[in-house]
Amino acid sequence: MNLSPLLFRRRMLASLVSLTTVIWWRNGSAQVGSGGTGITQSIGSADLVVGEVTLRRAGQQPTGMVKGAKLLQGDLIETRNDSEAHVAFDDGGYLAIRPNSTVRIAQYVVTGDATDLATIDLIRGALRSVTGWIGKLDAPRYRITANTATIGVRGTDHEVVLVQAGDTAGLEPGVHNHVNEGATTLRNQNGVVNIASGTAAYSPSSGARPLRHAVVPGIFERLRTRQESAINNHAQNIRQRMEERLRERGKLRSNERFEQFRQRQQALRQGRADLKQPGNNTGQSRAAEVSKDRQAARQALREQRQEKIRQQQESRAQERAGQRKKAGEKRRIEK
């Protein structure tokens, strides 16, 4: 049967829509994200919620955020004067949203691969961030924006406060950043300043180039709450948490630690960069190394799955043995 071009295109479009619907229906774990991000999965969860905290998601009514709530890329979180929220991200990172603050998780992609990236927007108030593997593996792919300033990281455990005109903080209006551990950069259109551990700097709202504070402003101490111990505990155990998340994804080899994983990832990414260089005679060997690492990662994942199956089988065998023992004792009693 011959179809006109127009009718053929209509039938092809209808088939494509039907196929897309079936795929969406089968993928029960996927969720529709916000902020135009399309189909996405959870990027983390609420680890601590004190007081009334509002979660806003595009296309949905605002809801009260509770501990354990799953978060998506694009979510906006608002706290009040007497409330606070902590987010545990899937890359091991941690975000504390201070009282009377608004934060948007603009971008957060967590795979354990080179595609990972994160952008967090501080719209109002203050936050404290402990970066997970995104900031530690590829620092330029993690940033915090506030007003007209952008904060990059190398590490890092740091605090940011957005001071508005008329605030009683006694500070110049703008973005103020204090580093607890590691280092950050504070950048605006007129300059950049490097901030070392134990120091602070600010980007004025006027647009003037960023400057270092002579001493760390007292506002950072005043912003700390009774929930600070939860952040400190996470920061102290950050490597363990990153390793747990990476193992869940099958990214770590057997007995591999995060530092070894980071070195391997850096070598892989350097290899990919070398492959893109024109006239590189080592391209084939680099490609072979990348392939070998991928095969090793797949083998490690298979071994983890096999070990899980073995444990399940052993558990079922022990359960059956216990049932047989109970049945034997019952028969002896009946005799």
Image (spheres, rainbow, N blue to C red):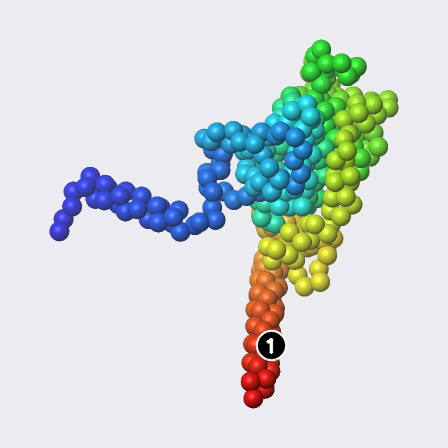
The answer to whether residue 232 is seen in the rendering is: yes
- Residue density around tag 1, few if under 14, some if 14–19, many if 20 or more, within 10 Å: few
Question: Which residue occupies the extreme bottom position in the image?
Answer: 335
Whether residue 138 is situated above or below residue 192 in the rendered picture: below
Question: Which residue occupies the extreme left position in the image?
Answer: 1
Q: Nearer the viewer, residue 2 or 132?
A: 132
Q: Position of residue 68 (x, y in %)?
A: 60, 42
Question: Which residue occupies the extreme right position in the image?
Answer: 215
Q: Residue at 74% x, 40% y: name it.
A: 230
Question: Which residue occupies the extreme front position in the image?
Answer: 334
Q: Nearer the viewer, residue 272 or 201?
A: 201
Q: Relative to residue 35, is residue 191 drawn left or right?
A: right
Q: Residue at 70% x, 50% y: name it.
A: 241
Q: Position of residue 60 (x, y in %)?
A: 47, 31
Q: In terms of image quadrants, where is residue 125?
A: top right
Whether residue 143 is situated above or below residue 90 in the rendered picture: above
Q: Nearer the viewer, residue 58 or 323?
A: 323
In what quadrant of the picture does the C terminus appear? Answer: bottom right
The amino acid type found where label 1 is placed reads Gly
Residue named by callout 1 = 322
The answer to whether residue 184 is seen in the rendering is: no
Q: Which secondary structure lies at badge 1?
A: helix
Q: Residue at 61% x, 30% y: name it.
A: 53
Q: Relative to residue 265, is residue 30 drawn left or right?
A: left
Q: Position of residue 123 (x, y in %)?
A: 62, 24
Q: Position of residue 185 (x, y in %)?
A: 73, 31
